Structure formats: C-alpha cells, structure tokens
Image (cartoon, rainbow, N blue to C red):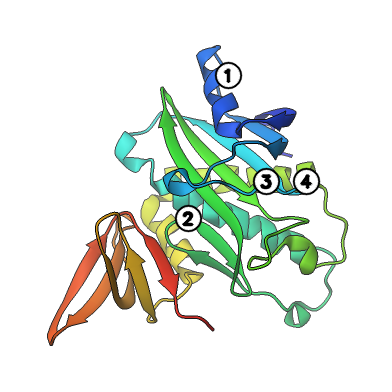
C-alpha cells in the first residue's frame, strides 16, 4: 500500500467529487482519496450520469496543484497508465504462463481504459480550488452489458481496497516518472497501448462531428486526426471531444 495517500471511505455519497470539495473546504491537505460503495448522483464527462454499480471502485483522487494549471490534463494520461498497470499486475499475479493470458488492455483517448474491446474504466478531471480532482471508476465486479469488469477476466477474489492500493502505488510511480523524465515519457507509454491508431474514427465535439484517421497524439496530448474532405487532405488537432470507433 502507498503511504502517501489518506483514504476517506463512505458507504454512500451523492458523488465522490462533491465530498472531495467539502473536505478541501474543511482544510484537507496532501494527497487523499474519497472512496465510496455507492453514488446517488455520480457523474462522468460533460455532466453525464455515472452508473454506480455495487462491487466496483468508485473514487476521487485528490492531488494538490503544485504544478501549472496547463499541465493538469497530463493526469488523464498518468491515471490511465496507472489503472492499466494495476489491471495488468492483478491479472498476471499467480499466472505461470503469460502467453496464456487472454486479455488486451488499451487506452482510449481522452480518458478511458478498455479491455478486450470494451470499457472497464472511466476518468474525470476537475480543478477545484488548489486541487486537481480525478474521478476514477473501475468495473471490478459488475458492469453495464456493453462494458466489461475485472471479474470476467479472472477467478481470483477481488478486494476493492486492495485494488485501489495497487492503483495508488502505480500513481506514485508514474508521478515520479513525470517529475524526473517529463510528460513526453508518460505520453509515449500511454501511446504504446493506445486504441485505434491508424483506424478510422468518428470525432464529436460540442459544435461538430466528423470522421478521419486517428494519426496519433500531439506532444501536449491533443488528438491528431487525418482528414480527407473532398480531396483536401489535412490534419486536425482536437483538444476535447468524444471519440467513437467502428463496430468490430
């Protein structure tokens, strides 16, 4: 277990983001986590309702903003890396032959983790006062039908707090990498497991929708899309959007 984080657990809350803000207002300091068993008003990106299913990791990771606000988005990639590394570590533990493992972990831009072509984790970034709040939901024991959960991939017993501790230890590791080696290394590691590079995607922003080829990421993490529109070929750089892949 990481000893850098204080964990606050509540059986039920409106949302872990709300409780985190209250704790900050009450003077909380350092790295801390708000974890719950159930959210009555959990939310995802763009204010969408978040499904709160029993047996899953539902938490807000609270990181003091001792860095420039422009770098806050880096944590979307850092947390995705940490969750995928935690999933990989959990699934490999006790396995004798890595070649027999039937799972593929991928990062979906901007802030999801997928396994075997289905979503297992969603991440939400929000800045509040002097903190970066990272909402993190990981399907451990239950999921919506179109998604996947960890219990579908292993027969091992899954302890939610134990899995959270693995995630926190991975976050500590990648924070050190970010500090010592820079965001470029984090981005390279993320991209090695990126879903859909070289494939056609549909991009939906608040103002438009278009299709193109996922060409990779810019040095700041923005999405780079190759577009061929009526014979005019160019790249578009997207900082915020929803991305959809062709059905497989």
User: Is residue 61 visible to the viewer in this orientation of the structure?
Assistant: yes
Determine whether 111 is above or below 215 in the image: above
Circle 4 is placed at which residue position? 160
Q: Earlier in the sequence, mark 1 or mark 3?
A: 1
Q: Is disc 3 placed on a helix, strand or loop?
A: loop
Q: Which residue is drawn at 51% across and 70% down?
A: 193
Residue 64: x and y, percent? 47, 28
User: Is residue 29 visible to the viewer in this orientation of the structure?
Assistant: no
Q: Is disc 4 placed on a helix, strand or loop?
A: helix
Q: How far apart are marks 1 and 3 (CA)?
A: 22 Å
Circle 1 is placed at which residue position? 23
Residue 217: x and y, percent? 33, 65
Q: Nearer the viewer, mark 1 or mark 3?
A: 3
Q: Residue 52 carries which label?
A: 3
Q: Residue at x 35, y 58 (%)?
A: 241
Left or right placement of residue 201 versus residue 77 in this view: left
Q: How far apart are marks 2 and 1 (CA)?
A: 25 Å
Q: How far apart are marks 4 and 2 (CA)?
A: 21 Å
């Amino acid at each position: 277990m990481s000893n850098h984080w204080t964990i606050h657990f509540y059986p039920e809350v409106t949302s872990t983001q709300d409780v985190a803000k209250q704790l900050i207002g009450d003077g909380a300091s350092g790295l801390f986590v708000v974890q719950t068993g159930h959210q009555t008003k959990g939310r995802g990106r763009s204010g969408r309702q978040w499904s709160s299913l029993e047996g899953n990791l539902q938490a807000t990771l609270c990181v003091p903003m001792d860095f420039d606000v422009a770098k806050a988005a880096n944590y979307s990639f850092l947390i995705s890396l940490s969750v995928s590394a935690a999933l990989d570590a959990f699934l490999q533990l006790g396995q004798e032959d890595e070649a027999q493992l039937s799972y593929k972990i991928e990062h979906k831009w901007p802030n999801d983790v997928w396994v075997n072509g289905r979503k297992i984790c969603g991440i939400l970034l929000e800045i509040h006062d002097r903190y970066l709040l990272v909402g993190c939901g990981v399907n451990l024991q239950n999921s919506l039908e179109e998604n996947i959960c960890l219990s579908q991939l292993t027969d091992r017993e899954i302890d939610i707090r134990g899995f959270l501790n693995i995630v926190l230890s991975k976050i500590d590791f990648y924070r050190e990498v970010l500090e010592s080696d820079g965001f470029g290394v984090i981005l390279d590691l993320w991209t090695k497991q990126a879903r859909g590079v070289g494939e056609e995607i549909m991009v939906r922003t608040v103002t438009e929708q278009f299709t193109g080829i996922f060409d990779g990421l810019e040095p700041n993490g923005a999405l780079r899309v190759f577009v061929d529109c009526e014979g005019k070929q160019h790249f578009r750089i997207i900082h915020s959007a929803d991305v959809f892949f062709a059905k497989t």
